[in-house]
């Protein structure tokens, strides 16, 4: 009886596998496509007559009309931003009427791990922009546009911080090639130069401001400009109130005064930004990129979920979310920029 049952189970599974194989071969797809991709589980499945095959893991779906990956991601996965899942599962496929596509339903690789290594997320850091620059912290507008065009033309996704957080918390996978774009301090050139370029390529960025600088001169961003940028997809984070080093005690500053200053910089800046922009500010950039154990503890107490240094390197899913690495983009050439786009760390994990 046992042998018969096991044999029958194996026959059933083989039959199911062969059924799927025939379907995928007819579609001109590799068998690996259906099992490779990753997406969260959602059950908004279209009627069976449009499904060539359906399981708990994926659907093979015949398009009744031309549809975009974003349309399919919203319907099947509940989130347009997960369009990349469908794109990666159907590379080279034209999403036209009558075409069959694979829709992965489960997230199978949340940490971007393979036998050859693991995924890392580059975070790019800028400060100010101008047509012609003299400071190393200034990026020429022409070069910045070339950099954003490179990302667009080479298939990079630009993440929002909440997407990064789901990756760091091992809740959701990310596209193979993705970056975060950040800008520090609060210069008006971000609004005047970088913001229009980012919108042109459909990208967003994180803008870290220190609140005492906002609106003080023509070179500083205003609260109204920040509200506009936020409404158009930018994330506004804290860079303290006065941009002071949170790891060094000032001359003549008492120990108690030092602690009070750290708290004011962290808690006070968040309170101001929350009130001015009507938000719960949860992302922070350390002034000068410096932090220590005490700073980390107060950063967490203040309510920040993500905090960034300027230590070079990418961020795997197991990185600590309050000490993320960032690469400052200082060189005025494309070679230096491209070298900062490392999205995979090779390591034999077998």
Image: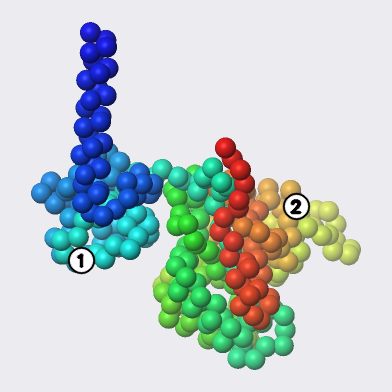
Which is nearer the eye, 51 or 276? 51
Picture quarter with the N terminus = top left
Q: Position of residue 266 (x, y in %)?
A: 65, 59
Residue underneath mark 1: 96
The x, y position of residue 246, in whole percent, is 75, 60
Identity of the residue drawn at 23% across and 25% down:
11
Q: CA distance from mark 1 to mark 2?
A: 54 Å
- Within 10 Å of disc 1 (Cα), the crowding (few <14, some 14-19, many 20+) is some
Q: Is residue 219 left or right of residue 275?
A: right
**For residue 248, above or below residue 318:** below
Mark 2 lies on residue: 292
Extreme residue toward the right, this view: 252
> Which picture quadrant has residue 22?
top left
Q: Nearer the viewer, residue 311 or 283?
A: 311
Residue in view at x 56 percent, y 81 percent: 144
Tally of numbered tags: 2
Residue 149: percent from left, percent from top: 49, 78
Counting from the top left corner in percent of width and height, residue 223 is at: 52, 77
- Rendering quarter of residue 83: bottom left
Please say if 163 is above or below 243.
above
Q: Is residue 150 left or right of residue 101?
A: right
């Amino acid at each position: 009886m046992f042998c018969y049952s096991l044999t029958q189970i194996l026959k059933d599974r083989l039959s199911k596998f062969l059924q799927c194989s025939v379907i995928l071969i007819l579609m001109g797809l590799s068998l690996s496509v259906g099992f490779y991709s990753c997406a969260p589980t959602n059950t908004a499945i279209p009627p069976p007559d449009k499904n060539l095959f359906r399981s708990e893991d994926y659907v093979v779906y015949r398009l009744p009309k031309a549809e975009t990956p974003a349309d399919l991601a919203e319907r099947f996965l509940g989130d347009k931003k997960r369009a990349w899942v469908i794109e990666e599962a159907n590379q080279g496929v034209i999403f036209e009427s009558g075409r069959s596509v694979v829709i992965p339903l489960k997230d199978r690789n949340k940490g971007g791990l393979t036998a050859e290594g693991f995924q890392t997320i580059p975070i790019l850091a800028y400060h100010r922009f101008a047509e012609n620059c003299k400071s190393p912290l200034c990026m020429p507008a022409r070069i910045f546009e070339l950099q954003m065009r490179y990302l667009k033309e080479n298939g990079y996704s630009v993440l929002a911080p909440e997407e990064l957080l789901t990756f760091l918390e091992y809740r959701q996978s990310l596209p193979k090639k993705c970056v975060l774009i950040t800008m520090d301090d609060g210069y008006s050139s971000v609004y005047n130069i970088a913001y229009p370029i980012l919108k042109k390529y459909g990208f967003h960025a994180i803008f870290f401001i220190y609140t005492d600088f906002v609106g003080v001169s023509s070179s500083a961003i205003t609260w109204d400009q920040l509200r506009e940028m936020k409404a158009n997809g930018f994330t506004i984070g804290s860079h303290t109130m006065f941009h002071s080093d949170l790891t060094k005690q000032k001359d003549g500053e008492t120990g108690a005064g030092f602690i009070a200053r750290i708290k004011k910089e962290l808690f006070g800046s968040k309170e101001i930004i929350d009130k001015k922009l009507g938000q719960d500010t949860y992302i922070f950039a350390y002034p000068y990129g410096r932090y220590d154990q005490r700073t980390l503890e107060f950063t967490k107490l203040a309510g920040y979920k993500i905090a960034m240094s300027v230590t070079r390197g990418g961020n795997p899913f197991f990185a600590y979310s309050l000490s993320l690495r960032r690469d400052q983009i200082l060189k005025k050439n494309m070679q230096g920029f491209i070298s900062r786009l490392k999205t995979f760390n090779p390591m034999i994990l077998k």
